[in-house]
Image (cartoon, rainbow, N blue to C red):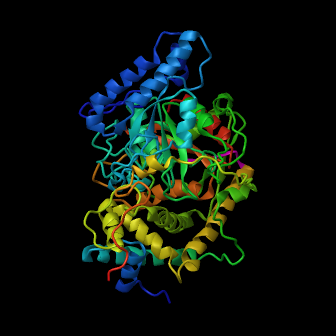
C-alpha cells in the first residue's frame, strides 16, 4: 500500500528545493525519504479523524493577537540593506538572466 | 560534582553570581569595563581550544560597559543586568556584527538590525561580548555540524558540548560569559546545558520574541538563557520575555519576576515522573543521579506521582515531519540573491540558486530541507505534514491532562552524558530516547528548565529536566532551585 520512494521522487524533490544532488547523495536521500514513509506509517496507527491540526501552539491558550494599526512607520535604511547584496546597483539586486534563449 | 580524572584538561570555571557582580559594580568595587576586559582576556586564552566564539563585539561591549560605569559613578540605580557579560548564539542578529548561523551560506553577512532579545538585554545594561558558535541553522545535537568547526566541551574538550546551542552552554561552563542566549527547537538549549553542567531554560513558546532569530522551525523555535545557576537564569528570562509587536506569535501573558518566584520553596508542589522516560537506553549512572534528584525533591516536601504519557513515542515521527517541513520553508530564502553567499559564475538564475545552496549549506541542512520539501509536496501534504500536526495536538493535550494532576514533570534531560567528538553514540536506543526526552516538550509548547543533577563516575555532568505547563515557568524554577540546593 505504501509506495516506495523512487529515484524520480528524489530528483523532483531536489528540484523543488533548488538543490542538486550527486549520485552518492541521491542514494542516501532515497534511504532517508523511505524512512519518512516508516514515520508516517507509525503516525497512521493513530486515529485522528476527529482531531484538528495544531499548527500554532498558542491557540491552546486562546491567545488572540491584536493587529497593529495599518500606519506607515520608518523601516530599514535601504542603503544599509543593499550593502549586504552580493551584486546590486544600490536599488535593485543583480542576478544572472532568468531564461536561456 | 565528582572530580574529573587528572588526564583530562578541564576548562570548567563557575561564573560569579549575577547579583554579586552587579553589587560590586554598583558599589564601585568593580568597573564594568574592567570586567568585560577580563572576560575578553579569558576568551583570548581559551577560545582557540574550545572554539566557542565566532566573532567578538568589543567596540559595542565597551560602549555598553562605559554606560553602566557612568551610571554607577553617579550613584544612579542600575538596571537588572548592569555590566553583566553575556554571549549571543550566532542565530540571533546583532546590528553590525556577523551572523553566520554556523553556516557558510551566511559568511560575511552583517545584519542591519538587532533581535528583540538582544535589544532587551542591552536595555537591561548587559555587556554583549560576541557571537557564539552553534550547529548550522540550529540543526544538530552535538555542535559538530557547524561550518566553523566543533565546539569542545569545557568539562572534557575531547567531548561534544551538545547542540545546537553547544557554544552557548560551553561559554557559561568555562566562564567565557556570565550568561548566554541560545535557542531550542527540539532540545537545543536543554541538552547542551545538561552536557556542560549548566542551567538552561526552555521558555514557553511565545514567551520570548523570535524577532531577529534566524528561523529554523517557526512553530517550535524558542530563544532562552543559559546561566551558572537557576536564579540567574530566571533573572535573564524576566529581561527577555514579553510581547513584541514584531512577533505575532509572542504572548501578552504577564512576565513574572521569575527570580523572586524561584526563591519560593518547592514544598507542596506535586511532581510527575513519567514512566515512558525511564526506559531501556537510559544510562544506569544517569538514572541513579536523577533518582537522587527526585529523592531530594521528596525531602524538600514535594509529592512525587507516577504519571503516564502514552503517546510519547509518536513525538519522534511528528517532530521529524513538522520540523523538517518548516525548515524547508524557512531556508528557501537563502538563494544568493539578497545576502549571504552567491556562487560565482552561474549562467542562469536557476543555476545560481542551486549552486549557491549546494555550496553554502552543509550536508545535514540539505538533508533536512529535502525531507521537509518531500513532506510538503503536492499529494503528500495532507498525509504527512497535516497528519503530524494532528498527532501534535494529541501530544499537547496529553501534557495538559498531566498538568491537571501535577505542577511539574521531571525527567533526565539526556539519557547519556556527553560523548566524544566524532563518535555519535552507537546505541540506537539511547539516541532514540535522547530525542524523546526533548522533542515532546518542544511540540507541546510547554516550558522547562534543565538543572545540573550530579555526574557520572567519570565526572560527566548529568542534567534533570523540569517541565512546567504553558507560562508556568515559575513552577519549573522553584523545583529546579530545590534540586540545585541539594547539590547532588
Q: Position of residue A31 (x, y in %)?
A: 36, 76
Q: Nearer the viewer, residue A99 or B372?
A: A99
Q: Residue at x 37, y 53 (%)?
A: B106
| Residue at image coords 30%, 77% | A27
Residue B295 higher or lower than A94, as above or below: above
Q: Position of residue B244 (x, y in %)?
A: 64, 45
Res. B291 in view: no
**Picture mark count:** 0
User: Between B35 and B319, which is closer to the camera in this rendering?
Assistant: B35
Give the side of residue A10 with respect to residue B206, left or right. Answer: left
When asked about the image quadrant of residue B334, the answer is bottom left
Q: x%, y% of residue B134?
A: 39, 47
The answer to whether residue B222 is seen in the rendering is yes
Q: Which residues are magenta?
A: B406-411
Left/right of residue B234 with respect to residue B101 in the rendered view: right
Q: Is B212 positioned to the left or the right of B393 in the image?
A: left
Whether the magenta-drawn stretch holds residue B146 is answered as: no
Residue, far bottom: A1
In front: B309, or B389?
Answer: B389
Looking at the rendering, which quadrant does residue B231 occupy? top right
Q: Is residue B307 above or below residue B324?
A: above
Q: Horizontal and vertical percent for residue B318?
A: 54, 67
Identify the residue at horizontal 37%, vertical 75% (top origin): A98
Chief secondary structure of the magenta span? strand
Residue B319, compared with residue B169, is above or below; it is below
What residue sits 57% from the left and 10% below the top? B74
Q: Is residue B58 left or right of residue A77?
A: left
Q: Quadrant of residue B145?
A: bottom left
Dividing the image into 4 quarters, which one contains the N terminus of chain B?
top left
Between residues B153 and B25, which one lies in front from this camera angle? Answer: B25
Amino acid at each position: 500500500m505504501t509506495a516506495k520512494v523512487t529515484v524520480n521522487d528524489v530528483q523532483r524533490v531536489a528540484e523543488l528545493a533548488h538543490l542538486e544532488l550527486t549520485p552518492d547523495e541521491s542514494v542516501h536521500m532515497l534511504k532517508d525519504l523511505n524512512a519518512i514513509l516508516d514515520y508516517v506509517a507509525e503516525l497512521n496507527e493513530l486515529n485522528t479523524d476527529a482531531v484538528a491540526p495544531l499548527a500554532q501552539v498558542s491557540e491552546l491558550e486562546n491567545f488572540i493577537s491584536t493587529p497593529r494599526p495599518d500606519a506607515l512607520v520608518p523601516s530599514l535604511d535601504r542603503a544599509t540593506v543593499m550593502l549586504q547584496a552580493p551584486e546590486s546597483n544600490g536599488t535593485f539586486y543583480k542576478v544572472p538572466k532568468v531564461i536561456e534563449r | 560534582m565528582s572530580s574529573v580524572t587528572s588526564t583530562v584538561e578541564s576548562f570548567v570555571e563557575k561564573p560569579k553570581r549575577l547579583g554579586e557582580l552587579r553589587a560590586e559594580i554598583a558599589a564601585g568595587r568593580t568597573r564594568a569595563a574592567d570586567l568585560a576586559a577580563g572576560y575578553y582576556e579569558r576568551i583570548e586564552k581559551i577560545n582557540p581550544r574550545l572554539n566557542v566564539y565566532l566573532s567578538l563585539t568589543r567596540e559595542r561591549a565597551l560602549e555598553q560597559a562605559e554606560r553602566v560605569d557612568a551610571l554607577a559613578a553617579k550613584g544612579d540605580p542600575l538596571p537588572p543586568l548592569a555590566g553583566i557579560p553575556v554571549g549571543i548564539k550566532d542565530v540571533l542578529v546583532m546590528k553590525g556584527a556577523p551572523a553566520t548561523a554556523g553556516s557558510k551560506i551566511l559568511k560575511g553577512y552583517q545584519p542591519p538590525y538587532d533581535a528583540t532579545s538582544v535589544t532587551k538585554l542591552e536595555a537591561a545594561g548587559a555587556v554583549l561580548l560576541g557571537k557564539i558558535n552553534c550547529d548550522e541553522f540550529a540543526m544538530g545535537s552535538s555542535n559538530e555540524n557547524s561550518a566553523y568547526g566543533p565546539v569542545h566541551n569545557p568539562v572534557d574538550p575531547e567531548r561534544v558540548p551538545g547542540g545546537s546551542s553547544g557554544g552557548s552552554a560551553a561559554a557559561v561552563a568555562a566562564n567565557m560569559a556570565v550568561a548566554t542566549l541560545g535557542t531550542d527547537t527540539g532540545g537545543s538549549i536543554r541538552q547542551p546545558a545538561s552536557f556542560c553542567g549548566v542551567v538552561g531554560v526552555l521558555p514557553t513558546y511565545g514567551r520570548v520574541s523570535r524577532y531577529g532569530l534566524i528561523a529554523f522551525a517557526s512553530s517550535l523555535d524558542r530563544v532562552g538563557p543559559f546561566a551558572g545557576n537557576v536564579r540567574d537564569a530566571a533573572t535573564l528570562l524576566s529581561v527577555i520575555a514579553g510581547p513584541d509587536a514584531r512577533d505575532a506569535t509572542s504572548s501578552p501573558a504577564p512576565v513574572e519576576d521569575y527570580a523572586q518566584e524561584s526563591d519560593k520553596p518547592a514544598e507542596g508542589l506535586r511532581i510527575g515522573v513519567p514512566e515512558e522516560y525511564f526506559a531501556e537506553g537510559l544510562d544506569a549512572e544517569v538514572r541513579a543521579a536523577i533518582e537522587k534528584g527526585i529523592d531530594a525533591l521528596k525531602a524538600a516536601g514535594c509529592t512525587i506521582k507516577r504519571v503516564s504519557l502514552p503517546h510519547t513515542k509518536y513525538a519522534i515521527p511528528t517532530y521529524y515531519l513538522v520540523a523538517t517541513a518548516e525548515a524547508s520553508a524557512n531556508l528557501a530564502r537563502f538563494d544568493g540573491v539578497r545576502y549571504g553567499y552567491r556562487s560565482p559564475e552561474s549562467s542562469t538564475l536557476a543555476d545560481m540558486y542551486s549552486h549557491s545552496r549546494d555550496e553554502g549549506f552543509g550536508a545535514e541542512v540539505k538533508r533536512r530541507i529535502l525531507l521537509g520539501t518531500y513532506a510538503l509536496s503536492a499529494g503528500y501534504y495532507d498525509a504527512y505534514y497535516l497528519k503530524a500536526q494532528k498527532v501534535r495536538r494529541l501530544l499537547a493535550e496529553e501534557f495538559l491532562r498531566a498538568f491537571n494532576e501535577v505542577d511539574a514533570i521531571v525527567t533526565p534531560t539526556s539519557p547519556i552524558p556527553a560523548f566524544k567528538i566524532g563518535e555519535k553514540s552507537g546505541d540506537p536506543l539511547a539516541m532514540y530516547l535522547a530525542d524523546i526526552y526533548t522533542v515532546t516538550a518542544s511540540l507541546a509548547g510547554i516550558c522547562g528548565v534543565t538543572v545540573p543533577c550530579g555526574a557520572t563516575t567519570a565526572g560527566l555532568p548529568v542534567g534533570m529536566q523540569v517541565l512546567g505547563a504553558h507560562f508556568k515557568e515559575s513552577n519549573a524554577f522553584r523545583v529546579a532551585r530545590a534540586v540545585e540546593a541539594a547539590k547532588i
